[in-house]
Amino acid sequence: MKPQETIDFHLRWGWTKLSKLYASEAERRGIPFSYVFILLHTERTGTPSTKLGPKMGMESTSLSRSLRGMEDMGLIERRPDDQDKRMMRVFLTDAGIDARRQARDLVVTVNERLRDLLGGEAVDRLLTEMRRLNEILDEPSALLSADPHSSKAHILSS
């Protein structure tokens, strides 16, 4: 099988192009790309810092470094949780809220434009299939099973 015939090739290729687009636009706006996802995943009521990494697939050391940088830029502040003082919650500052608005607008604009270019039905199908792919990937053992009838992938395709 040629690389261009694999799903992972197209996922990686597409994501690389999309992330470069987002990164260049974020840098143009003065926000490092790694901060964009943290901004978008931080809730108004504050988000436990331990929940941010898994939401974004970011290692804790990278997350800690990014959070420190975001604090230095005045985008976030970390405060102890009201109920559990051992837990730190991440809150957006006014500057962070403005940066999140810019990041969200960028993501929405790109997605709306992709919907225009690809067509609404094609995007809806793509999203449906991506959700199915993620469900299958939640159980990687199903992909490696010798018996395709025993896998979750078989159930999802029925």
Image: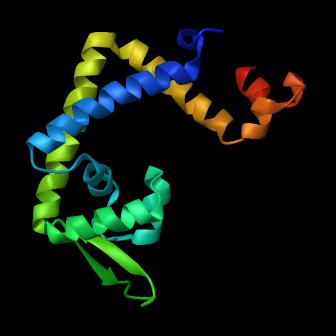
The image quadrant that residue 64 belongs to is bottom left
Q: Is residue 118 above or below residue 112?
A: above
Residue found at x 80% / y 31%: 144
- Taking depth in this image into account, of 116 and 133 the one nearest to the observer is 133
Q: Is residue 82 above or below residue 109?
A: below
Examine the rendering and report whether any part of residue 152 can be seen.
Answer: no
Position of 113 compared to 56: left or right?
left
Looking at the picture, the colour scheme in use is rainbow
Relative side of 144 to 108, left or right: right
The image position of residue 82, as x and y in percent, is: 37, 87
Answer with the quarter of the image where residue 90 lies. bottom left
Q: Is residue 148 left or right of residue 51?
A: right
Along the viewing direction, whichever of 59 and 146 lies nearer the viewer = 59
Asked where in the image residue 151 lies, by quadrant, the reply is: top right
Q: Residue at x 26, y 56 (%)?
A: 39
Q: How far across and down, in percent of the image, does residue 25 sit? A: 15, 36
Using the rendered image of the protein, determine whether residue 12 is visible from the camera's viewpoint: yes
Q: Is residue 146 above or below residue 101?
A: above
Quarter of the image with the N terminus is: top right
Q: How many marks?
A: 0
Instruction: Identify the residue at image location x=28%, y=19%.
Output: 114
Q: Position of residue 63 (x, y in %)?
A: 38, 62
Q: Is residue 23 above or below residue 36?
A: above
The C terminus, quarter of image: top right
- Find residue 129 and report its horizontal and vertical position in percent: 55, 23
